[in-house]
Image (spheres, helix red, strand yellow):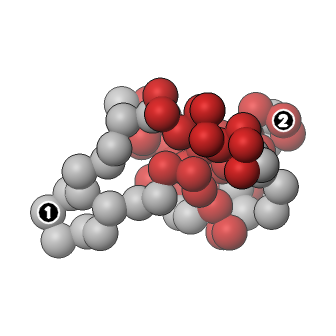
Amino acid sequence: MIGATGAEWALIGLFLPVETGRGCRPVGDNRRFFDGMMWMARTGAQWRHLPSCYGKWNTIFWRYCC
């Protein structure tokens, strides 16, 4: 998994809103979400091809779209 370095995340993480959770589902990690979004931007792949190390593809998709 290639993502933001610690120094980069210290700057970027401040701009992402904290996820509040959705009922019985646990709150996701913003850094993992951001790294998944960067993977999508770099590769141009379809959402279903997002590697599982970034989380479920549909969760990343809905956080991106909404």
Residue 36 shows in this picture = yes
Residue 30: image x %, image y %?
A: 49, 50
Residue 46 shows in this picture = no
Residue 15: image x %, image y %?
A: 47, 28
> Could you say which quadrant of the image residue 62 lies in?
top left
Q: Residues within 10 Å of mark 1 (few under 14, many from 20)?
A: few
Residue 33: image x %, image y %?
A: 55, 50
Alpha-carbon distance for marks 1 and 2?
32 Å
Q: Which numbered dot is residue 42?
A: 2
Marks 1 and 2 in Cβ contact (< 8 Å): no
For the residue pair 38 and 65, the one nearer the viewer reads as: 38
Judging by the rendered image, the residue that carries numbered circle 1 is 23
Secondary structure beneath dot 1 equals loop
For the residue pair 10 and 15, the one nearer the viewer reads as: 10
The answer to which of marks 1 and 2 sits earlier in the sequence is 1
For the residue pair 48 and 33, the one nearer the viewer reads as: 33
Amino acid type assigned to the residue bearing label 1 in the image: Gly
Secondary structure beneath dot 2 equals helix
Q: Name the side, left or right, on which 39 lies relative to 10.
A: right
Q: Residue at x 73, y 63 (%)?
A: 51
Q: Residue at x 61, y 32 (%)?
A: 11
Q: Residue at x 77, y 49 (%)?
A: 5
Amino acid type assigned to the residue bearing label 2 in the image: Arg
Residue 49: image x %, image y %?
A: 73, 56
Quadrant in which the N terminus is drawn = bottom right
Q: Name the side, left or right, on which 60 lies relative to 25.
A: right
Q: Residue at x 73, y 43 (%)?
A: 7
